[in-house]
Image (tube, rainbow, N blue to C red):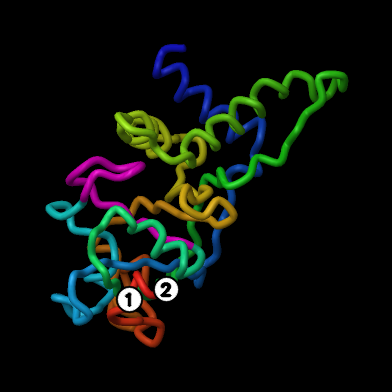
């Protein structure tokens, strides 16, 4: 299937065939995010800006975004954020809980629960579409093997999901490759969209300063 046909098919499936894949997360939803550092005392002052989406100049190659493109990666629980930064050789991390300041539209690929029957005349036409979406959700959540890169999932996001026109979305919910029973989010918001609670009206992700834990020892956990 040509790439553009694939991406068009994906939008058709999640919009019209399995509409439950597009859902709202309400304002006030909590997402945890951590940042590794070498010493127990971080070389930065913990804040919404410092713990939020990396600035473009510091954004590393990631599952849905290439080097230099800022997005917010967060998890529903604190332990999963620590598992997701195992790429770092740093022993310590600082972690905090962000909350969304408005409702967001999410492509939820954490579980595709529609299993149409090929023997049901009202469902059989949906069989291959549901199977396609389940396979795609499994593909984006699996760990990479040696020699692979993130280019396919990065292109699906940049050329497809971020360009949905029927139902534009703000991000994706997906299974963690490190903790398969837990869930991550990637939100299409950059560093300027992150800040501290009660400081700016325009930010989308506010850090709760009471949630911040500084210098968590990752080895002793």
- The secondary element bearing badge 1 is classed as strand
Pinpoint residue 194: horizontal percent, then vertical percent: 29, 67
Pinpoint residue 120: horizontal percent, then vertical percent: 87, 22
- Say if 204 sits above or below 116 in the image: below
- The span shown in magenta is 60-75
- Say if 219 sits above or below 9 in the image: below
Mark 2, Cα crowd under 10 Å, few <14 / some 14-19 / many 20+, is few
Q: Residue at x 43, y 50 (%)?
A: 170
Q: Are marks 2 and 1 in contact (CB under 8 Å)?
A: yes
Query: Which residue occupies the extreme bottom position in the image?
Result: 210
Magenta span includes 50: no
Query: Which residue occupies the extreme right position in the image?
Result: 120
Q: Residue at x 71, y 41 (%)?
A: 113
Q: Name the residue under label 2.
A: 221
Residue in the foreground of this view, choosing between 67 and 202? 67
Q: Residue at x 37, y 68 (%)?
A: 205
Q: Name the residue under label 1.
A: 217
Query: Which residue occupies the extreme top position in the image?
Result: 1
- The secondary element bearing badge 2 is classed as loop
Magenta stretch, main secondary structure class: loop
Quarter of image, res 221: bottom left
Q: Which residue is drawn at 51% across and 40% down?
A: 167
Pinpoint residue 110: horizontal percent, then vertical percent: 58, 47
Query: Which residue occupies the extreme front position in the image?
Result: 220
Mark 1, Cα crowd under 10 Å, few <14 / some 14-19 / many 20+, is some
Q: How many marks?
A: 2
- Say if 128 sits above or below 85 in the image: above
């Amino acid at each position: 299937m040509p790439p553009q046909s694939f991406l068009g098919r994906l939008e058709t499936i999640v919009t019209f065939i399995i509409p439950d894949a597009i859902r709202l997360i309400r304002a006030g939803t909590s997402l945890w995010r951590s940042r590794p550092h070498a010493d127990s005392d971080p070389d930065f002052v913990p804040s919404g800006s410092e713990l939020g989406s990396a600035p473009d100049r510091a954004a590393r190659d990631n599952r849905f975004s290439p080097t230099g493109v800022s997005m917010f990666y967060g998890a529903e629980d604190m332990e999963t954020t620590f598992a997701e930064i195992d790429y770092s050789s740093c022993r310590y991390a600082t972690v905090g809980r962000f909350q969304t300041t408005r409702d967001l539209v999410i492509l939820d690929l954490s579980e595709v629960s529609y299993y149409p029957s090929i023997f049901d005349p009202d469902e059989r036409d949906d069989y291959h579409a549901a199977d396609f979406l389940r396979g795609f959700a499994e593909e984006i959540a699996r760990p990479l093997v040696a020699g692979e890169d993130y280019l396919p999932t990065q292109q699906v996001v940049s050329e497809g999901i971020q360009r949905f026109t029927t139902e534009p979305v703000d991000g994706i919910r997906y299974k963690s490759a490190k903790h398969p029973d837990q869930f991550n989010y990637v939100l299409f918001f950059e560093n300027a969209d992150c800040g501290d609670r009660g400081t700016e009206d325009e930010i989308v992700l506010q850090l709760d300063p009471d949630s911040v834990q500084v210098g968590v020892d990752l080895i002793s956990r």
